[in-house]
């Protein structure tokens, strides 16, 4: 998985290499995340940027930035998503969560309007492995501005199985 690159071409998100994430099985054991929530309208986030800036500042101040960027989104409803930002230690004044489990991953590329198609493809992939999904997370690999610069908008779906 790609290491955080402070010298990213954009000065923001590093380029994403999809290969290490394509159709893999990962195991998390008490993987530490800062947890927060984002308001949405019909699954479209309306305060994602401000929530990310606030939490990245907290993580940076606590010197808890993960060398492997990982941001998971749990689409709780059409109106709210929980986000999980990987960290290396507890962050003051933040809710922390630990995730454990086995996850199947699959990488998708394209506009977010393809999400329902991606979910169907992910479910087919899970079934092909003889498994059932307990929960589905979305890993948005770059912000929209960086995706535009890089010419690729990758999203990784992680299914807890």
Image (cartoon, rainbow, N blue to C red):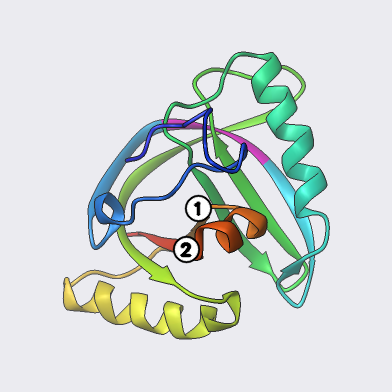
Q: Is residue 130 magenta?
A: no
Q: Is residue 110 above or below residue 28?
A: below
Which of 93 and 23 lies nearest the eye of the viewer?
23
In the picture, the quarter occupied by the C terminus is: bottom left
* Res. 155 mark: 2
Q: Position of residue 21 (x, y in %)?
A: 30, 54
Residue at image point 36% right, 65% down: 107
Q: Is residue 33 magenta?
A: yes
Which of 72 and 126 lies nearest the eye of the viewer?
72
Q: Position of residue 31 (x, y in %)?
A: 42, 32
Q: Secondary structure at mark 1?
A: loop
Distance from label 2 to label 1 (Cα)? Answer: 6 Å
Q: Are marks 2 and 1 in contact (CB under 8 Å)?
A: yes
Dot 2 surroundings within 10 Å: few (below 14), some, or many (20 or more)? many
Left or right? Give the position of 35 relative to 70. right
Query: Farthest left residue?
Result: 129
Left or right? Give the position of 120 relative to 102. right
Q: Is residue 136 above or below residue 66?
A: below
Q: Which residues are magenta?
A: 31-35
Q: Position of residue 3 (x, y in %)?
A: 39, 32
Q: Secondary structure at mark 2?
A: strand
Image quarter of residue 124: bottom left
Residue at image point 48% right, 27% down: 66
Residue at image point 72% right, 33% down: 55
Q: Earlier in the sequence, mark 2 or mark 1?
A: 1
Question: Where does label 1 land, which residue?
Answer: 141
Residue at image point 46% right, 85% down: 117
């Amino acid at each position: 998985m790609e290491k955080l690159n402070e010298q990213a071409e954009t000065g923001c998100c590093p380029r994403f290499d999809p290969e290490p994430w394509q159709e893999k099985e990962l195991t998390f054991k008490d993987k530490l995340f800062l947890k927060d929530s984002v308001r949405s309208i019909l699954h479209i986030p309306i305060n994602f940027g401000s929530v990310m800036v606030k939490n990245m500042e907290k993580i940076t101040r606590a010197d808890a930035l993960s060398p492997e960027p990982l941001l998971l989104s749990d689409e709780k409803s059409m109106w709210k998503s929980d986000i999980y930002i990987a960290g290396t230690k507890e962050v003051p004044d933040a809710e922390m969560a630990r995730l454990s489990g086995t996850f199947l991953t699959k990488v998708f590329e394209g506009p977010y309007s393809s999400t329902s198609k991606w979910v169907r493809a992910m479910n087919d992939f899970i079934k092909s492995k003889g498994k059932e999904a307990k929960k589905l997370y979305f890993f948005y690999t770059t912000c929209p501005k960086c995706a535009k610069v890089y010419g690729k908008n990758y999203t990784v779906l992680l299914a807890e199985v």
